[in-house]
Structure formats: C-alpha cells, structure tokens
Amino acid sequence: MRRHRHVVEHARTLAARYGFAEVATPIFEFSDVFRRTLGDTSDIVTKEMYTFADRGGSELTLRPENTAGVARAVIGGTLGARRPFKCFYAGPMFRYERPQKGRLRQFHQIGVELIGAPEPLADIEVIALGAHLIEALGVLDRVTLEINTLADEASRRAYRSALVAHLEANEDALSEESKQRLRRNPLRVLDSKDEGDRAVLADAPVIDAHLSAEAAAFFDAVCEGLGGLGVAFTRNPRLVRGLDYYCHTAFEFTTEALGAQGAVLAGGRYDGLVETMGGPPTPGVGWAGGIERLAALVEEVVGDVAPATRPIAIVPLGARAEAAALGLAQRLRHEGFAVELTYRGSLSKRLKRADQAHAAAAVILGDDEMERGVATIRDLDSGDQVETPEAELGSHLARYAPGQ
Ligand code: ATP
Ligand code: MG
C-alpha cells in the first residue's frame, strides 16, 4: 500500500494542479453500461467481464474500466452541468484475465477524463498530465510515449477498407484470433503480438493516406502542442485502443523495464461515447494508468519508497516510566507526532524495535529521569543524545514531526 499510495498521491496532487476534481463512481454498474460502450467485439466484453445477477435478477458487472461509469454519471446529471468537466479517479477494476506478473483480476487504476472539450488543447493537456506524472514518479527515462490518430469516422472507414483488403490478401498467414478480428473488428488486428501477424502487418497500409483534412489538422495540432511543451513522443501508426469508441488521438506510455506487461498508462479521445450511451453529442478525452505497474516501475527504477512519516519511539525503563509512557505517547500524538510505543524488553531490545519501526528518534524514560522530570532524546540516525525537561519534549522533537 505504501508504493500504491505513492503513485496515487502523486497523481491526485498533479490532477488537482491541472484542474481535475476527484470523483468516485460505483464499482458495479448494469452490464449494459459496459457492453454498449465497449462494443460486443472488444476483449473486455467478449472474455474479461465479471458479470453476475443480483437478487432482483438484474445483470451487473464489476467495472473493468472507469470511463463508461463516468460517462453514465455525466449523462445522469450527478456530476453537474459544467463543461468542460474534468475529473480524476482512483480505484479497483476487475477483468477476468490469466493472472500473471503485472496482470491481475483485481487491479487498480488512476485516471482522468476531460469531457465536453473538442479542442486539441484538451488532448495536449491530458497527455501532458500523464507525462508530468511519470516524470514526478522519477521514471520518465524508462518510459516511451507513443501516439497515433484514429481520425474521424469517415477517415477510419476508408482506412478500414484498405486494411481489410491487405489482411484478406494475406489471410492464410494470420493467427486464428486475427482471422476472427478481421471479420468483427479489423483495426484490432493491428494490436496483435503474434509473430505471423506482425509479419503481415509490417507492410500493411497506415491510416495517413486516408486522413481527412480536419483529422490531419487535429493530429498535427496535438503533435505540435506536445512538441512545444517538450513532451517527447514517437509516432506509432499501428497503435489502436482496445475500446471501440476511440477517435482522433490514441496514446500509450510503455516501458521495457517490466517484461511483457509494459503498458503503464494509456488513453485517447472518445467523442462518440456519451452519445452511444444515449446522451447528447459530447466530446471527451482521458487516460487510465495501472497503479500496480506504475508502482512496480517505481520500485524497479527508483527503489523502495520511504514511509511518509518516521515515528518517534517511546522507550520506558522501569515500572514508573512504563506507567507514564502511554500517556506521553498519546500527548505527543495529539501534538502531531507519529509515535511507536515499545511494550517490553531491555533498552537494547526496545531500541531494536524502534529501529524496525524506522523511528527517527527515541524518547528514553528511566525511573531516575522521571524523578528529575526529564527525558532523553536519542537521534536514531546519528546516535546523539540530549536530555530535556519533560515539559519541553514537544519543542525538542519538532524537527521529527511530519512536514518539518
Ligand atoms: P494490456 O494491453 O496490458 O492488456 P489494456 O489495453 O487492456 O492493457 P487499458 O484498458 O488501456 O489496458 O487500461 C489502462 C492501464 O491499466 C494499462 O495500461 C495497464 O497499466 C493497466 N491494466 C490493464 N489491465 C490490467 C490488469 N489486468 N492488471 C494490472 N494492470 C492492468
Ligand atoms: Mg487488456
């Protein structure tokens, strides 16, 4: 949880700095919320949803992602009428996948959605926030940003025909899965990791030749905006998103430091989504990041995340000191210190316990010190000790308080 929170807290702080307000949507929704928005051919709907009937016979699904839930809440009006609407979320998601390193059935995402802005500026800011987070986590030099355009519907339709023609001409070389996708959702073939498929895809047409003037201008604006901010990216014309409602910008931050599960944060523009769900035409753009993968990357690159606050250990020696220790611990906690009370043992045993708790300092209280109304503060990093009147403990310990 320490690593997990490290990621979430950086994301929460930065999201607020970019004007995204935190929201929480339900962890389960009616299955249709996902089925209609993700499309019947997506991996999530065909094989990854946790779906069950409730006592009243309604069919529910544990959320596999958060965008559909946010869009549902936007349409329902619970998130207010302000546009653009900018929100941040963090929470558990569920997908029935083959569990392995970096791929869990209950995993956690942070994410942002910017709803109601058709401008490329929205895409730029959303991507810049993702890049800022990855930089703040200290892992920017191990992560690559790839971007692509899925253009508008007409451009995509023209491209789809060209792609299907190429894939059909090479159908014998395609994997079974890609043969099926070719019929149902041909753009998804671009996503395949199968070696035979990759060979066929190597000389497949790319979308560029089919872009309308508007789609090309939109993509240029996004690329120029990112370039102007110094956000490094590479164009990957084969990058598609698994979800059917994406258009224009698609992007993914990936790393090679985590083995096979290299996608750490991904997103794109989804102008058709809200309308698909029965709402008014409403553009949107957003991303989701995998908390476990980001946390693993931080651990791999930066190392262990230090605890946010180191406690002060109370080390009483003798009956009278032991009787006073709990009250002292409680007094210091009310003054804002994190305090670890050692329950038993000799001085050295208790100091060892303080060390295990990563304490920054110990307050050593003997019966003799009690008599004199003083206590000893030992800095556990340097070993330096000072004796201080008991009443002045708080001010002497001030440099060990959180945020000092
Ligand atoms: P992948 O290609 O790895 O299956 P995806 O395209 O299904 O990823 P998205 O739907 O874009 O993933 O979700 C955004 C992020 O959530 C991913 O980039 C990844 O970091 C994380 N993620 C997705 N599925 C899982 C999972 N099962 N376990 C852990 N993290 C996950
Ligand atoms: Mg997946």
Image: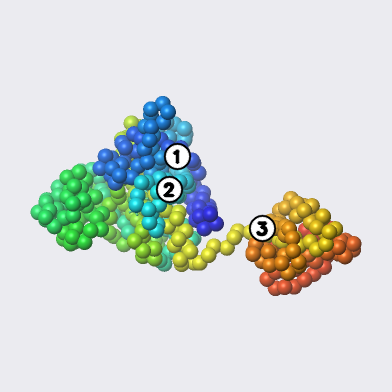
Q: Give the structural element (helix, strand or loop) at label 3.
A: loop
Numbered circle sitting on residue 106: 2
Identified by mark 3, the residue type is Pro
Q: Which residue is mark 1?
A: 27
Q: Amino acid at mark 2?
A: Gln
Residue 340, percent across and down?
70, 58
Q: In front here: 341 or 394? A: 341
Q: Nearer the viewer, mark 1 or mark 2?
A: 2
**Mark 2 or 3, nearer chain start:** 2
Residue closest to the far front: 345
Amino acid on which the number 1 mark rests in the picture: Ile
Q: In the image, which disc is placed on residue 75?
A: none
Q: Position of residue 63 (x, y in %)?
A: 40, 41
Q: Position of residue 374 (x, y in %)?
A: 85, 63
Crowding at dot 3, Cα within 10 Å, few <14 / some 14-19 / many 20+, comes out as: few
- The residue singled out by tag 3 in the image is 402
Residue that appears at 46% across and 37% down: 26
Number of numbered markers = 3
Do the residues under discs 1 and 2 have CB atoms within 8 angstroms? no
Report the Cα–Cα distance between label 1 and label 2.
12 Å
Residue 246 placement: quadrant: top left
Task: Report how far apart the C-alphas of labels 3 and 1 lie in the structure.
Answer: 33 Å
- Disc 1 on helix, strand or loop? loop
Colour scheme in use: rainbow
